[in-house]
Amino acid sequence: MIMRGWLHIFSIAAGIAAPVAITLWSTSDFGVRSRAHYAAVEQQSAERSMSARDVVMAFDTLAFGERKPREAVLRYVAAEAVDHHQDIRGDRQSMIEMLERNGWSGTSPRRTIRHVVAEGDLVVVHHHLVRQPGTPGIAAVDMFRVKDGRIVEHWDVLQPIAANSPNRAGPF
Amino acid sequence: MNQKLSGSERRFVIAVYGAQFFLGGWFLFHGANHWLQFFPQPPGSSSVSGQLIGALIRSGLFDVVKLIEVVAGIMLLANRAVPLATVIGFPVTLSIAHLNIAVNGDPFSLATGVIIIALHSLVALGHLDKYAPMLVVANGDPSSRGLRDMFGKGEARQ
């Protein structure tokens, strides 16, 4: 029998020391299983458990309330998301470019939500969009599809508000 | 195993022992950590594995898993009943490998899953001759022969 005596004792010591060393390194601040790693997983897990409505509202707050459209898209829109807006390519990068081109990183555009309807993985936001202060703006509907805590599809319908409309109720 | 080993046989035995003691240390350290808290219990490296580990803890099944790890780890390190330790530890290894490979999917998890399956398989291959009687297809009728062999007196072993 090969495994006996001091060789067995050395093997036990080495057998315990190797996984202990690997585990202590990997769970240290410099390892691949650091506290930061698990904090990121926890945050991702919390975001995945958010309702579709909460995801869209969190995106809306960050993009349009806090004026950080790039951060909002990167955080809440899936990399493979599709945007059906007809003026852009429709990928995620083109969504960022459109929002920045429309001035959402600055202070001019304003957006007032009138209704939010959520059903299943779909969220519809009916809002009043004013891109240039002093103009009547646009009656807009954005529709989002959400999957695993990320927006994966977006449609929009935009109706410019007429300055002289015969409708006494107004667009909202 | 007192006879002189050939070169290839010696290398195989050393490789199996290397896998066995690493796996034993791994099982014992991670199993005992459940009670002794050498390092914080990993909550899972993905949303799904975190949910699964949480459910195992809440249901009490995690205690059983960790007890199996400790027992199998001690058997592997003591170099006693290694074929049995390999069998009772295999469901744990399979679960760890599945979570790491199929659920987590990041490079470190993939490496962890592949390595633990490879180590466990190597130890099992090193004792394949002990499993051979179990691998028959034409199993025949059940009998009490095994019970008599294990617990019976000499005259009962006919």
Image: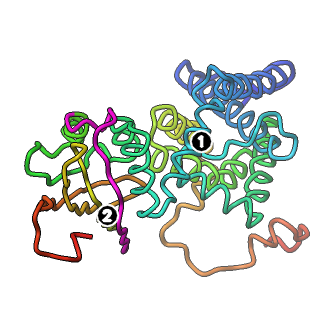
Using the rendered image, report if marks 1 and 2 lie on a common chain. no
Which mark is on residue A106? none
Query: Crowding near pointer 1: few (<14 within 10 Å), some, many (20+)?
Result: many
What amino acid is at disc 2? Val
Quarter of the figure with residue B152: bottom right
Vertical order, A36 against B156 (above or below)? above
Q: CA gap, disc 1 to disc 2? A: 54 Å
Q: Residue at x 10, y 74 (%)?
A: A166
Q: Residues within 10 Å of mark 2 (few under 14, many from 20)?
A: many
Pick the front one: B33 or A5: B33
Position of the C terminus of chain A by quadrant: bottom left
Q: Residue at x 72, y 49 (%)?
A: B85
Residue indicated by mark 1: B120
Residue identified by numbered label 2: A125
Tally the marks.
2
Quarter that holds the N terminus of chain A: top right
Query: For numbered disc 1, what is the local secondary structure?
Result: helix
Q: In the visual, does A80 lie left or right of A67?
A: left
- Where's residue B66, x and y in %? 76, 51
Q: Nearer the viewer, residue B7 or B22?
A: B22
